[in-house]
Image (spheres, rainbow, N blue to C red):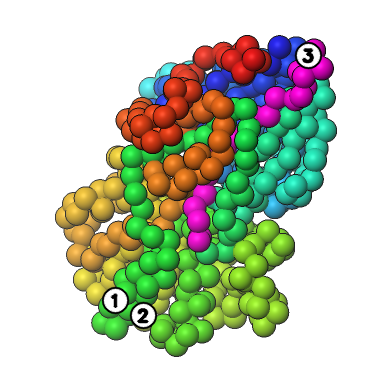
Amino acid sequence: MIQWSFIGGTSEVTGSRHLLDTGEAKLLFDCGLYQGTRKEADEFNASLGFDPADVDEMVLSHAHIDHCGNIPSMTRKGWRGPIHMTKATGDLVPIMLRDSARIQEADAAYLNQKTSRRGLPQVQPLYTTKDAEAAIPLIQTHHYYQPVPLAGGVELIHVDAGHVLGAGLASLDIPRSGGRPPLRVALAFDLGRYNLPLLNDPVQIEDPDILIVESTYGNRLHAPAANARADLRDAILPPLERGGKALIPCFAFERTQEILFHLAALRDAGELPRVPVYVDSPMAAAITQVFEHNHAYLDPDTRDLQEKHGQVITRDWITFTESIDESKAITASGHPAIVLAASGMCENGRIRHHLKHGIENPRNRIILVGYQAINTLGRRLQNDEKQVYIFGDLFQVKAEVMSLHAFSAHADKLELFRYIRKAHAKHIFLVHGEQESREALAQMLKTNLHSDHVYLPNNGDVVDFEALVS
Ligand SMILES: [Zn+2]
């Protein structure tokens, strides 16, 4: 028996969770946080969708919260099994889980302030720092291409997903009865792009029986990754030339390091003035150090930088601020500067302070370099709203707002198609995409690959892979 349960992250892009039951062992693949309306999210995250006591071992694809962020809900219920991942992912996960626990605790404290005023019962955080800490000793790390024996005789190999530092595509060999060769299942929960800076291209897994692949941008094309550096330069120069600041809301993991890498290259080439560059996010600073400690995971094109500077991203002209006082000094300064701060959608983090002090200054420019979800401050700015609330106060948007579209860590529809076509899988399951996006990609595959074996599973579906393939 080879039963695959699609638990979460099928027709949505968060909450990635999959469970394999071989009859002898149960293996969990990813345990991501579902992000949606509070009520839905609370229910789905707290219930997990499976009993952790049944899970023998877990495999993690990468350190994004929508893939790893619900692991502490398992340890909260007493689970203590091994969690397999690459070495770079293993360095990132503690930072991500501690930050996520802090947010869960802060959210609950904020709600409890409100509910206690109304005499309502107190809410508990989904999990706490203690639950996140309990997950960290469970991490077992391996390198790409290193075969990892799992429970039930399953063999795992991670190869580079080209998505974010340490991200792995999994190739699984699952034993079959009757002396038949193992069933090969390939997992591409988040598939990266070709020619991304810092990262290697996604490694092709060939001829699996089953391919389970994401479809986030199954109906979209990105601007080429090769445009990113020039676009960034052209966006940054005008505000600096008129004495303003370039304010860049940035995810602490990967996008910050990617932007810094481009800034370093631009400055080395004499294309960027020598203005201060601030990274105002202690989490981004910690993650940048993880990049510097994992050069073996980076694109070989960065080797000459390693030799020349000893570092790939960090330079002595980049200031990583730790304290709130340092952060306040940046907002108070009237000098031209480049400021990177989390969060990427302007909902949390120190970027809100920089926006509060800089959004009414027409010399400044706010440069959006990531996806802006609906109902976020970032999306309101992207939609050219002229008045926005920050910390409850109304501000006039007088700074320019600009969106750059060459930055994405996910394959677009042509990159997905290229990967899937070259895989030659017998059966293809599309997950991790809004329904519209999955359907568009499924149609493209059916038309161009003439395949009738493309499926769009839903959360809760269980498929017997052995019966499907025989
Ligand atoms: Zn991801």
Amino acid tagged 1: Pro
CA neighbours of label 3 inside 10 A, class few (<14), some (14 to 19), many (20+): few
* Residue 34 at x, y percent in the picture: 49, 30
Tell me the chief SS of the magenta region.
Answer: loop
Disc 1 secondary structure class: helix
CA neighbours of label 1 inside 10 A, class few (<14), some (14 to 19), many (20+): many
Task: Choose mark 3 or mark 1, whichever is in front.
Answer: 3
The label shown at residue 336 is 2
Task: Choose mark 2 or mark 3, whichever is in front.
Answer: 3
- Name the residue carrying label 3: 177
Task: Choose mark 1 or mark 2, whichever is in front.
Answer: 1
Q: Nearer the viewer, residue 141 or 185?
A: 185
Q: Are marks 1 and 2 in contact (CB under 8 Å)?
A: yes
Q: Are marks 2 and 3 in contact (CB under 8 Å)?
A: no
Amino acid tagged 3: Ser
Query: What distance separates the C-alpha of mark 3 from that of mark 1?
Result: 66 Å
Q: Which residues are magenta?
A: 175-196
Q: In this rendering, is residue 328 above or below 349?
A: below
Q: Earlier in the sequence, mark 1 or mark 2?
A: 1
Q: Nearer the viewer, residue 175 or 119?
A: 175
* Residue 424 at x, y percent in the picture: 56, 36
Does residue 441 appear to the left or right of 145 in the view shown?
left
